[in-house]
Image (tube, helix red, strand yellow):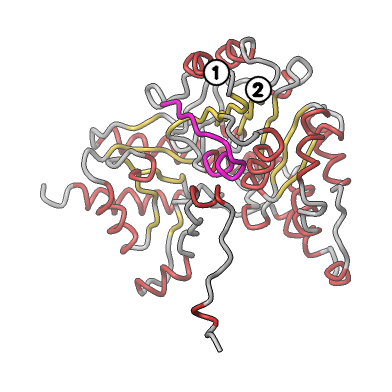
Amino acid sequence: MQSLSSVPSPPVKDLLNRIPAYTPAKSMEQIRRELGLESVDRLAANENPFGSSPLAAEAVRSLGSDLLAQYPDGSSQLLRDKLAERLGVRTSQLVFGSGSFELLTLTAQAYLNPGEESLIPVPSFNWYKGATLLAGGVIHEVPLVNHSLDLEQFRHRINASTRIIWLCNPNNPTGTIFTADALLGLLEHVPSHVVVVLDEAYYEFAESEDYPDTVKLLEQYNNLIILRTFSKIYGLAGLRIGYGIGNESIIEGINRVKLPISLTATSQAAASASLDDHEFVSHCLHYNRQGRETLMQSFDHWNLPYIPSETNFIMVDLLQDSGPITQELLNRGISVRGGAEFGMPTWLRITIGTPEQIARLIGELDSLLHSND
């Protein structure tokens, strides 16, 4: 009898051969065990260092154990009603998903035919490429200019095969924004069959007066969808809840490929309660602003270039390969993101942590950068 190990496995779909398997980052527990650390300051994933709202925690506790055996509300109606009122849109203009990853993937599945093109900024959030390839689409990269999305470039790259334009604002990893005028200048020239995806995962942190109020544009542009998340300012990354805002026609397309139930009762309750905690959001924004300023002052003192950020992270150029310093910081219990994966090998991306975390990072980074002084 032939052994199971010698029997060929079924082949995956042809298009999957173009997509590398996703390898999740090591958990903090894995890192602590491997390096023998008691704790790690996690400044690599752009999570909220202050956790989540106490109102969210209380909402989860009050659910009751009997709900564990029941399916959650597939329409997320309570959350839908509250969010629609907050945004000034109709409830039918919202779609919910398990974080941005799912919503990005669903958008590509709904609107990108095999062989059609996505315009993707580079460097930016890498899953735009994964979502495009999973749908059988073709990636067309649009390089940043001065670390920012140049929407004029996108306008000139549109061709007969273009189907989706992915725009991250503020952009990850650079933290820069494009303005309302620049966005309008692009939208006026985008054909109606091309979907414009505005990924606004970090929009709550943007303070510039020129940052676009995109929800107001939905009545004018039927080909626009805005994606946001509860993972960042609301600190619910562990519950995986994101949402899209668009006109009914574009939301209907996404609902056709969406799994019937993708949000748990826990995530719905926590997200709904988080919307009520304005004090928590203000607290996080205050310390994020303060921490960003502290980091920039240190970078100026060290004469290191950096990119002014409109987010809860900031990039700094170490003027040398950042890989060894990234590893040494990890050895000392501080996790940051090296820039090599973004095509920026001398840069670090640093999540803006608590005042204590920032002070510790600055001290360790100073000793590493100036150990031979």
Badge 1 element? loop
Residue 48 sits above or below residue 173 on the image = below
Residue 331 sits above or below residue 350 on the image = below
Between 106 and 240, the one nearer to me in the picture: 106
Between 128 and 91, the one nearer to me in the picture: 128
Find the magenta span and give its range: 129-143
Left/right placement of residue 190 relative to residue 246 reads left
Q: Residues within 10 Å of mark 2 (few under 14, many from 20)?
A: many
Cβ–Cβ under 8 Å for marks 2 and 1 = yes
Amino acid beneath label 1: Ile
Residue at image mark 2: 194
The residue at the far left in this view is 373
Instruction: Name which residue lies at 34% across and 35% down.
Output: 297
Q: Position of residue 243 (x, y in %)?
A: 72, 41
Badge 2 element? loop
Amino acid beneath label 2: Val
Residue at image mark 1: 158
Left/right placement of residue 313 relative to residue 241 reads left
Residue 174, quarter of the rendered image: top left
Q: Position of residue 52 (x, y in %)?
A: 65, 53
